[in-house]
Image (cartoon, rainbow, N blue to C red):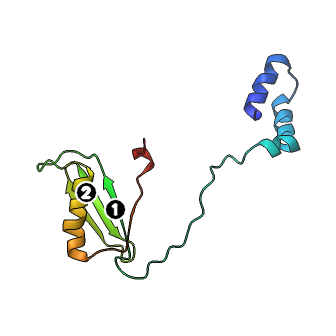
Amino acid sequence: MGVKKTIEKMKTVFTWYKMSQDITEHIQNCTICNKIKGTGKKPKAPLMDYRVGYPLDRIGIDIIGPLTLTKKKNKFILVIGDYFTRWMEAYPIPHQHADLVAQKLVMEFIARFGIPLELTYRPRKELRK
């Protein structure tokens, strides 16, 4: 249960001098409690070393928004970045439909810089619902 819950449950039935300190020490030194108890940290995936050899080997895209509506009725920003050079391009867009994102990617980014070998997209957690 943990220290706080154990102390609260024990207080309903028992009481003695330095009860909280005794319970805290017992739980900290209990081998069974420490085996079962987790570390309290969420497991994280290890960082991976990803090497990109040349410009436009790999690009990443993301969409920022919704933001406040602009005069030209744009509400989102399409961000495209090159992993090697770290060059970023930002394009205002009114919505985030696939056809518009693909059109901006092809007609404005790829037409200027060339075709990348790999394209990545990782949506942020708050957008995954």
Q: Is residue 20 above or below residue 116?
A: above
Quadrant of residue 31 within the rendered picture: top right
Q: Secondary structure at mark 2?
A: helix
Total count of labels:
2
Q: Residue furthest bottom?
A: 54
Q: Is residue 19 above or below residue 66?
A: above
Percent of width and height locating residue 99 = 23, 54
Q: Where does the N terminus fall, quadrant-wise? A: top right
Q: Secondary structure at mark 1?
A: strand
**Closer to the camera in the image, 85 or 26:** 85
Percent of width and height locating residue 101 = 25, 57
Q: Amino acid at mark 2?
A: Val
Left or right, 70 with respect to 121, comes to left
Mark 2 lies on residue: 101
Q: Where does the C terminus fall, quadrant-wise? A: top left
Left or right, 129 with respect to 8, comes to left
Q: Are marks 2 and 1 in contact (CB under 8 Å)?
A: yes
Q: Which badge, 2 or 1, is on the more N-terminal residue?
A: 1
In 3D space, how far apart are the residues under numbered discs 2 and 1 (Cα atoms)? Answer: 10 Å
Q: Residue at x 82, y 23 (%)?
A: 10
Mark 1 lies on residue: 61
Q: Amino acid at mark 1?
A: Ile
Question: Given this view, does label 2 or label 1 mark the residue nearer the observer?
Answer: 2
Q: Residue at x 25, y 59 (%)?
A: 102
Left or right, 53 with respect to 110, comes to right
